[in-house]
C-alpha cells in the first residue's frame, strides 16, 4: 500500500525549464494510467493518459512514459510555465472495464518566474 | 460542454451532525464516482454508480455514509453522523469512455 502523510514530494523549477514528475504504481495488472493536475481549490483536471500496451505518449507540451518492468510512470512538461504550478497525481486503473482509479500521493510543482 | 457541478462548495458542521452533498454529472455520462480527498493525499474512491445502480461501494463506510443516484443522473452523498476525521474534500466525477472528469469538490470541515 501507499505511505500516507501530509507532506507532498515537491519539485521547484525555473520558468522555461523542462519538468519531470515521477510516480510508482502498485498493481502490475493495471492496464490504463492517467495524469491529473490539481490547482488549489479545484478538482483534478485530466492532462494525459496512456494504455499499458504503450511506453510513450505525447500531448501538447506533455509526454508520459510508462515502464511496466519497474512499475514506473513519469510526466514530462516542456518549457514549464507559471500556470503549470499545481499538484500532479498519477492514477492507475485497477478495475478493468469499471475504470476504478487508484491515485498516487501527488507531487507539488512550483514554477518560479 | 458544462462540467461536473457540485454543491455546496464549502460546509462547516459540528461532529455528530449530518451533511449532504449534491452532484450533477456531465450530460450523458452514465458512470458517476464519489471520492474523498484528505489534505495532502490523492483522492480515494468511495462509491461508483453505473446509471442508478451501484458498481462498487467496497470502500464506503456504510455505518455513516450513504449515496444514491435515483434517476441515473444527479447523485447525493450523505454523512450521518459526521466525525472529525471526515474533514476532507468530497469530489464527484463522471466518465465517458476511459476518462473521468472531476467537479470542483465540496470542502467539509467537521468541528
Image (cartoon, grey):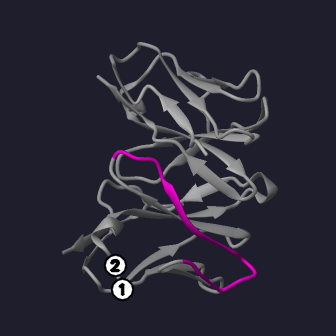
Q: Does residue A50 show up magenta in the picture? A: yes
Secondary structure at numbered mark 2: loop
Is residue B19 positioned above or below A60 on the image? Answer: above
* Residue B75 percent across, percent down from the top left: 64, 27
Residue tagged 1: A18
* Residue at the image position 71 percent from the left and 26 percent from the top: B69
* Residue B14 percent across, percent down from the top left: 33, 16
Residue A25 or B21: which is nearer the viewer? B21
Q: Earlier in the sequence, mark 2 or mark 1?
A: 1
Please, which chain is the residue tagged with disc 1 on?
A
Q: Which residues are magenta?
A: A41-59
2 and 1 marks in contact (CB < 8 Å): yes
Residue tagged 2: A80
* Residue at the image position 59 percent from the left and 57 percent from the top: A102
For the residues beneath circles 2 and 1, the answer to whether they share a chain is yes
**Position of the C terminus of chain A by quadrant:** bottom left
Amino acid at each position: 500500500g501507499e505511505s500516507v502523510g501530509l507532506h507532498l514530494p515537491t519539485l521547484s523549477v525555473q520558468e522555461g525549464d523542462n519538468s519531470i514528475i515521477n510516480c510508482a504504481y502498485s498493481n502490475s495488472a493495471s492496464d490504463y494510467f492517467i495524469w491529473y493536475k490539481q490547482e488549489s481549490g479545484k478538482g483534478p483536471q485530466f492532462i494525459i493518459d496512456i494504455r499499458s500496451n504503450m511506453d510513450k505518449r505525447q500531448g501538447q507540451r506533455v509526454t508520459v512514459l510508462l515502464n511496466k518492468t519497474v512499475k514506473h510512470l513519469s510526466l514530462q512538461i516542456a518549457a514549464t510555465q507559471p500556470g503549470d504550478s499545481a499538484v500532479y497525481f498519477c492514477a492507475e486503473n485497477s478495475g478493468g472495464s469499471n475504470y476504478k482509479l487508484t491515485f498516487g500521493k501527488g507531487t507539488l510543482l512550483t514554477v518560479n518566474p | 460542454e458544462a462540467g461536473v457541478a457540485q454543491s455546496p462548495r464549502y460546509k462547516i458542521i459540528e461532529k455528530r451532525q449530518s451533511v449532504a452533498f449534491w452532484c450533477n454529472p456531465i450530460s450523458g455520462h452514465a458512470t458517476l464516482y464519489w471520492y474523498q480527498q484528505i489534505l495532502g493525499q490523492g483522492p480515494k474512491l468511495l462509491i461508483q454508480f453505473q446509471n442508478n445502480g451501484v458498481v462498487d461501494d467496497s470502500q464506503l463506510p456504510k455505518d455513516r455514509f450513504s449515496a444514491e443516484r435515483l434517476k441515473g443522473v444527479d447523485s447525493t452523498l450523505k454523512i450521518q453522523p459526521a466525525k472529525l476525521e471526515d474533514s476532507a474534500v468530497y469530489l464527484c466525477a463522471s466518465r465517458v469512455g476511459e476518462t473521468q472528469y472531476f467537479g470542483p469538490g465540496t470542502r467539509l470541515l467537521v468541528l
